[in-house]
Amino acid sequence: MTKSFYITTPIYYVNGAPHIGHAYTSIASDVLARFKRLDGYDVFFLTGTDEHGQKVETAARDSGLDPQAFTDRISADFRSMADAMGVSYDDYIRTTEPRHKLSSMELWRRIAASGNIYLGHYEGWYAVRDEAFYDESELETRPDGTRAAPSGAPVEWVREPSYFFRLAAWQDRLLKFYEDNPDFIAPTSRRNEVMSFVRGGLLDLSISRTTFSWGIPVPDAPGHVMYVWLDALQNYVTACGFPDERAPRWHYWPADVHVVGKDIIRFHAVYWPAFLMAAGLPVPKRISSHGWWVVEGEKMSKSLGNVIEPRKLAETYGLDQIRYFLLREKPFGADGSMSHAAIVSRINVELANDLGNLAQRSLSLIARNCGGTLPGRGPLTEDDAALLAAAAALPDAVRACMNRQTFHEALEEVWKVVRAGNGYIDRQAPWALNRTDKPRMETVLRVLADALRVIGTLLQPFMPASIGRMLDQLGVPSDARSLVALATPLPDGLALPAPQGVFPRYIEQTQ
Ligand code: MSP
């Protein structure tokens, strides 16, 4: 039976337009989804929008639209952003859909039936921007004397009747769960933070609101809507068909990876497993978190006017170039800065010079000196064998990185072979062999073509369109681009299309 793999992005708040931070989470998830498909898995890749709560309700009111019309519009914009960025999702969930309302109400009933919900009164701090409750001890005092959440979000004092989830009672079970599942939270630094937060003691969590109505109703409790995070997290289970355990996608649950930003780990790594355990449902296998992007050293914000629109960035530099940059420039778990100079440098040095030249030099020599057909291989020298061995070891090395979501390391592994390929072509100088030793030239060019095929196969998830063109030029049929297909060599004498540059240099526009 085919192994399945279920991967999710966070669902995005529809209070404003998508920016590069959202695109980053989705592109990283997409790269992993595509890699798993290439590696033979039956993948279910979910993304969508988080449409309830006070923040969205307020944004709708500010724009003069009713919340449903407002969320329809912004959700469609997020979807078109995902399409434009090449995000190959299998389902796009919206939390205002009937399937999700049904699923969230059933989750609530199950948690309630387990005795983990009680009615009380919440009095404390709330940050609408984060849609999060904060304890007094977590707040910071700003220079003007006002209080703020650790994220910098303004907080307000809230008093309202509320249902509570008995989170405090889950402390020991959560800690045991983290200990038994050391890979549940990545990277390790975040795992340590979560564990010390939980060790510090958990408070029961307010899970319903009564001061506004834009949410999923709490079953049998007029006036209460569910806390938006309870409804939001449940999207991952809804998409598998919950509560219908015979639904065609039910077998995907529990998720293999929830990809999330560092700001929303607590919700995913603490509240979410506790809700699920209370409801008697299986818990996801991994929460993989990433750091944040700043722009030219500054935090993105509407007031600074430096919010980056992902579709514009792709228009300026090329979609594959941006996908590559985002995953190469910084380690996944760490923060990083995006700048014009850094993007241009990645494009010109790594894509155009390193990879583009290797492919272009090899393919144009094949076109010119081998009649445009794939040459065969004669006896191998040590140098040939070394390059082929490095290429052959690459799929396992990249797979190991992908399983840890260390995308920049996966690319570094590939680039080691790209650089080795450039060293090899310089040493072997096949252009000079054309007159002196044609069979040897053919072997060298075939070794290069074989190494490029492995490189290309592994780079497809990162840069699907450009690498697709590179594999076309290498003569790799579209049904022979998976990892397992690498075991079957391409036939000698295969006719290749005329080579064309795949990775152009970025040339500065002069006014
Ligand atoms: N709606 C919640 C998620 C619910 S999941 C059950 C939410 N939405 S969000 O739209 O605010 O953020 C979605 C994702 O975008 C988060 O993973 C967040 O980390 C990411 N990013 C937002 N700004 C970012 C950067 N500047 N850089 C990188 N990622 C950032 O939270």
Image (tube, rainbow, N blue to C red):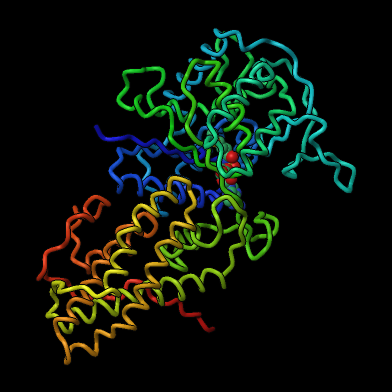
Image quadrant holding the C terminus, namely bottom right
At which x and y percent is residue 185? 56, 37
Closest to the observer: 450 or 120? 450
Task: Indicate whether 165 appears above or below 503.
Answer: above
Q: Is residue 80 visible?
A: no
Q: Is residue 431 visible?
A: yes
Residue drawn 36% across the image and 77% down it: 422
Q: Quadrant of residue 93?
A: top left
Task: Indicate whether 130 appears above or below 445.
Answer: above
Q: How many marks?
A: 0
Task: Indicate whether 76 appears above or below 397.
Answer: above
Image quadrant holding the N terminus, namely top left
Task: Indicate whether 433 appears above or below 123.
Answer: below
Q: Quadrant of residue 37?
A: top left
Where in the image, quadrant-wise, is ligand 1 located? top right
Residue drawn 16% across the image and 84% down it: 369
Residue drawn 47% across the image and 32% down it: 285
At which x and y percent is residue 198? 68, 29
At which x and y percent is residue 450? 24, 66
Closest to the observer: 37 or 119? 37
Residue drawn 71% across the image and 24% down it: 202
Residue located farthest toward the left when viewing the structure as drawn: 493
At which x and y percent is residue 115? 60, 8
Q: Quadrant of residue 122?
A: top right
Residue located farthest toward the bottom when viewing the structure as drawn: 435
- Horizontally, residue 319 falls left or right of residue 494, namely right
- Horizontally, residue 461 falls left or right of residue 56, namely left
